[in-house]
Amino acid sequence: MSLFFFSRVRCLTAVAAVVLTTAAPGVAPVGIPQAVARPAPDSFADLAEKLLPAVVNISTTQTVKTEQHAEKVPQDLPQLPPGSPFEEFFKDFFNHNKQQNADPDTDARKATSLGSGFIIDAKGIVVTNNHVIADADEITVILHDNTSLKAEVVGRDKDTDIAVLKVKTDKPLTAVDWGDSDVSRVGDWVLAIGNPFGLGGTVTAGILSARQRDINSGKYDDFLQTDASINRGNSGGPMFNMDGAVIGINTAIYSPSGGSIGIGFAIPSSLAKVVVGELINEPDHIVHRGWLGVRIQGVSDEIADSLGLDKAKGALVASVADNGPAQAAGIQPGDVILTFDGKAVTDMRHLPRLVAETPVDKTVPVKVWRKRQETLLQVKVGRLAEVETASATDNPKPTPKATADTVTALGMTLSDVTPDLKEKFSLGDDARGVVIVDVAKDGPGAEKGLKPGDVIMEAAQESVKNATQIAGKVADAKKSGRKSILLLIERQGDLRFVALRLDQS
């Protein structure tokens, strides 16, 4: 059975790559003005001829060292049936050659891989994917006329999988310009040029299939989807609009086998242009991202109903970092961020990118939903920095046990925080709220993934200190005609909001 997977074109591991499939030319859709939806050209030849010199092949080599006496079959061994008499023959043949060239201490070999890139500055600035050149000892850029130039890394950003290279040349190179991916529409024709399977400059065409795709490859996922063919070696290549401007960097595919099935993904130019600019212009060649200082979660229909929102939208603030920009601006847990710097936050995935792209120290308006009405705040954006993982603290010493009355609500058994429950569920000394002791298998709590040991800190956006308060909040919500109640849950230091339907309790 085939397994579908997302694959970046990781050249060193010879996984999959990115280019665009050829789509049959067609006419503009009925009812859409010709000035808005441009029909497919009779040929892409003129555009391809103009763009081909700006697209490069990228060859990398990496020294891979393995133990000389490692007892494993070489990767180059032909695939033979188990127990075949030729299996030992080929194994002995490869081991003989290996020993002839063996280093006294280790056996080193060169791993070569291929990718694509494009020139954005005639002086020799090349853009590609970070995974194309990751861990490479040597990087060679091969121009359209087969000229080979050694390249050095200007900067790289793992979070967006973008890298910038520099080559030295005694003549101006052909460069391409960035386009605006934000104005590209689903159904627009796109052109891609890359290096599939190391074949050299290859041109393919397709359409923009979808926007804002999240393929779980990183926290800033916002891919353009295309039906263009993507294969090994095309990663890092450009996606062009019909004006010949770069609107994306081809990066990944969705495939059952590593080959193209017409579902490919590209980093949009609206994101790539900002990242590339910082990698080139910042003195440390590092991307300086904006920081808000909140932990967020999505807004489900149940959560929207419990908060009085007309529909599920925005990003729900689960917690606020101490001394962060959000705390200084007055943002609170339970707020739903609706807009950031005048831009609508369509869902929780959208907010991190908006914040990251905002210049550090810029003050921006943030509209939040709080207590069933909109509130406008001003936030001075901070700088995102790598935060070291906090070391685990020792388990607290056992304390005298005590008991407390329990309450059954929402299909769960709830209790006040007691010393014995702290010990049983490894809660902190400063734990506060109401502990979930048991969860009914067919109750609303189980459906939302709640489990014993979780701590309820708020109910209906108000702090709770004992189990009877939650029972009261549930009763009040039912009297008000609400369909659900919002709980703030803490689990091993992580906070999240959960909306439980009252008609299921």
Image (cartoon, helix red, strand yellow):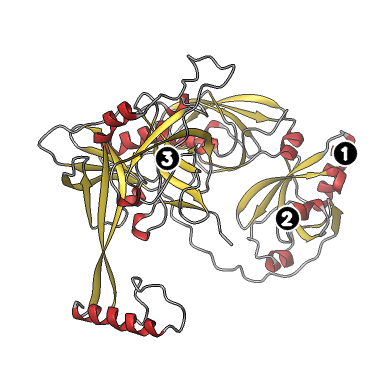
- Residue 258 in the image, given as x and y percentages of width and height: 46, 55
Picture layout, residue 45 above or below residue 58: above
* Mark 1: amino acid: Lys
Residue 281 visible in the displayed image: no
Return the residue at label 3: 20
Quadrant where the N terminus sits is bottom right
Say what secondary structure mark 1 lies in: helix
Which residue: 33% across, 71% down?
A: 76
Label 1, label 3: how far apart the Cα atoms are: 54 Å
Closer mark to the observer between disc 3 and disc 2? 3
Return the residue at label 2: 450
* Mark 3: amino acid: Leu
Of residue 431 and residue 358, the one placed in the foreground of this image is 358
Residue 336 visible in the displayed image: yes
As drawn, is 226 to the left or to the right of 480?
A: left
* Mark 2: amino acid: Leu
Return the residue at label 1: 478
Quadrant of residue 96 within the rendered picture: bottom left
Closer mark to the observer between disc 1 and disc 3? 3
Badge 1 crowding class, 10 Å Cα cut-off, few under 14, some 14 to 19, many 20 or more, is some
Residue sticking out furthest to the right:
479
Say what secondary structure mark 3 lies in: loop
